[in-house]
Amino acid sequence: PTGSQNVGATAAPGDVGDLGTGAGDGVGTGAGAGAGQASASAPEPAGKLSVSANAEIGDLVTDGAGRTLYRFDADTAQPPKTTCENDCATKWPPVAADDALAGEGIDKELLGEVTRPDGTKQLTIGGWPAYRYAKDTAAGDVKGQGVGKKWYALAADGKKAKAEPAAGLSTREDPKLGEIVVDKNGMTVYRFMKDEAWPKPVSACTGACLAKWPVVAPVEANDTEGVEKKGLMSFTRPDGAAQQTIDCWPIYTFAGDKKAGDTNGQGVGGTWYAVKPDGKPVGAPKK
């Protein structure tokens, strides 16, 4: 029986408990895990639940203290069942059901409870037992997201929180450049001052230039946010590739930008500049 196993002798500190592999593998699930672990699994109060926005994960549920709530893939929602006990529950403390209140964005009809093996009542959201992560030490932390590919932040409907796909083109406020256009990955978009827009788009960036300045692929007008729609079109380059324009000006990204928010291409060679929402170059010398 699982209760006879010596968990402390076999589990690497901080590893197995984080994954929360559940009752089926004999990891800290039986009486032999000890009274200390059993008491550690007692649910902590939830308080007033609310929905918080996270840029990477999307809208997720937080407790009254602003801490992220999670669900475990080894559990079930229909019917609600928890499989995280003892050592697992130390790493992933269950959320108590008795004081949970539905705050803004939370449907109280989706809140419920499940009786844990120790007799305590655990909060469920959309049927899924709710947990916190012990390594989330501050409000807004989401360090438990994706742990072991089994733990995920809870959305208000009980599903896994998931960010909406970013628009193909949108804008962001840069502290130095002001409002500039970015692609779906948040990478800064640029214009080349040697290009032409009228009477039709013409790109002067060819050959080796394209290795440093990849073209932005066509984007549907309804897949943009904050970008001027006038002159928003694509054209076919001489090499056969399609390229997006803003105000009919061809646009590019820069290979030297390694992450979203980088603007390393700004002013390169005195000919490359970030793009304003109306297609004008940011900081380019006036002709």
Image (spheres, rainbow, N blue to C red):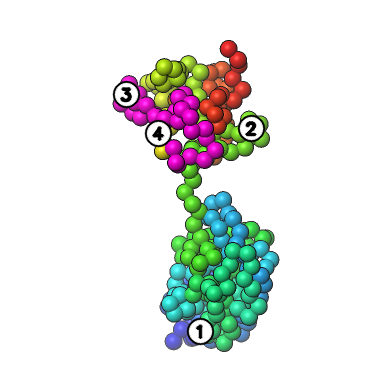
Q: Residues within 10 Å of mark 3 (few under 14, many from 20)?
A: few
CB atoms of marks 3 and 1 within 8 Å? no
Kind of residue sitting beneath label 1: Gly
Q: CA distance from mark 2 to mark 4?
A: 24 Å
Q: CA distance from mark 2 to mark 3?
A: 34 Å
Outermost residue to the front: 230
> Residue at point 32% right, 21% down?
238
Q: Position of residue 104 (x, y in %)?
A: 63, 64
Q: Residues within 10 Å of mark 1 (few under 14, many from 20)?
A: many
Quadrant containing the N terminus in the rendered view? bottom left
Residue under label 4: 217
Tag 4, which secondary structure?
loop
Name which of mark 1 and mark 2 comes first in the sequence.
1
Disc marking residue 239: 3
Quadrant containing the C terminus in the rendered view? top right
Residue 166 drawn above or below residue 177: below
**Residue 163 seen anywhere in this rendered image of the structure:** yes
Residue under label 2: 178
CB atoms of marks 2 and 3 within 8 Å? no
Name which of mark 2 and mark 3 comes first in the sequence.
2
**Residue 154 seen anywhere in this rendered image of the structure:** no
Residue 4 drawn above or below residue 177: below
Residue under label 1: 30
Name which of mark 1 and mark 4 comes first in the sequence.
1
Q: Nearer the viewer, mark 1 or mark 4?
A: 4
